[in-house]
Image (cartoon, helix red, strand yellow):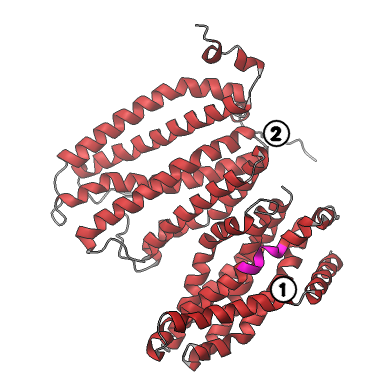
Amino acid sequence: MIRFILAIIRRDLLLVARQPAEMINPLVFFVLVVALFPLGVSPEASLLSQTAAGVIWVAAMLATLLSLELLFKLDHDDGSLEQLLLAPYPSWTLVLAKVFVHWLVSGLPLILISPLIAMMLFLPSEAVPTLMLSLLLGTPTLSLLGAIGAALVTGVRGGGMLLTLLILPLYVPVIIFGASSVAAASQGMPVDGYMALLSAMFVFALMITPWAAGSALKL
Amino acid sequence: MAQFSWHMPRWFHQMGSPKWFYNFGGLLQPWFALAAVALLTCGMVWGLAFAPADYQQGNSFRIMYVHVPSAILSQSIFLSMAIAGAIGLIWKMKIAFMVARSCIAIGATFTLIALVTGAIWGKPTWGAYWVWDARLTSTLVLLFLYAGVMALNQAISERQIAGKATAILAIVGTVNIPIIKYSVEWWNTLHQSSSFSLTEKPSMPAEMYLPLLLTVLGSYFLFGLVVLIRTRSQILQTQNGASWLLQHKDISGAK
């Protein structure tokens, strides 16, 4: 079973490597959205540093949402999803492998570029480690929860918008705690509670979502 | 391996039969309607007109008799929808998916009523129509979850698959219900904590509490009535041409 998971991971990474746009697009989107805020709202450092935590988190969430639709769509369209589901391994293994690649391709670059973004929005530098840690815990959770939505709307027309509508209510707690942790850190307050809750949400998502998304894929 | 001797009771499996559900539901329907109308009228009139005014809020607290039942029902209905969906998935009962589908619209309506009446109540008491505290935000998330379930149900054209997909989504969304219910205990919220529970004596006097009880019960009967009507109509839609239906007195007109 581990070999199956590794094989799927290798296959998906190969597919991404052939189309680097899939990896670059969410990143560019993230940076663009973040850049739009000072332009649209106010370039003042005081205002920006107060809202930076929330803006970065919402932008990260939007970037993840953008790339989620393709999670199962490409495989569904050419029929390989059905073949993969016929494999003698539980469907949650397939979901786990795909979500891992999705996170590597969309979540990890966000985490790595977040210090630069934090500087653009004048986030206090003592909050940057918390930002990276909260994104490290939060983006896999977002990918996992998004997988349920992506699995449910596979093959449905107009799935992209529907996917957003389905997933956003589930994302709300993650965003609330992620953004609050960074806001608390920028004021110098302890973030242990927030990190604990973010970790709990991640573990919960890890337990439940592969199974739920696997059942949804088989529909 | 020892023989598995415990099974679900017979009535549980009987309810999975469209004919049985249609007939039994038809028997229950007028009684539910009667109970709903009686309890709601009595409770609303008593609460909105005759209950004593609150010493702090005056007469504006009366909207509680609309707000609280709607809020309670909005959460209970989501839970019922998820349970019906789970029963449908586990026991592969089509009726269970129909029941879950019936819950969506009424649940969303109750949530909307709760949010709007809450906003109306909030203006004189808190000075604001809306605050982003834990309970209001999580109830708004509940409304979005209902909208998502509704959208998913309509988007998938094949009825059986739509039933299963909405069941999965409803089950996943149930995680929000404890968050709403315990939000007033876990966070520092502007929304007051519950004044009554199933196990303790209520903190309000009986003249205020009893009409509330009546409206809550009446709303539950209203929910039951709507589910019965909608599920029975779905049975009519899907059992087109079934022999028991063609001979049924509702269709053939025979007395």
Task: Tell me the amino acid under the disc marked 2.
Answer: Ser
Tell me residue A117's x, y (percent).
55, 87
Task: Tell me: B121 left or right of A150.
Answer: left
Where, by quadrant of the figure, is residue B106 drawn? Answer: top left
Circle 2/circle 1 CB separation < 8 Å: no
| Drawn side of residue A44 relative to residue A164, left or right | left
Which mark is drawn over residue A22?
Answer: 1
Residue topped by disc 2: B5
Query: Looking at the image, which residue is at 62% across and 82% down?
Result: A111
Q: Secondary structure at mark 1?
A: helix
Quarter of the image for residue B40 reads top left
User: Residue at image x 60%, y 58%?
Assistant: A163
Q: Is residue B24 visible?
A: yes
What span is in magenta?
A66-71
Q: Secondary structure at mark 2?
A: loop
Q: Residue at x 21, y 35 (%)?
A: B45
Side (left or right) of A82 relative to B83:
right
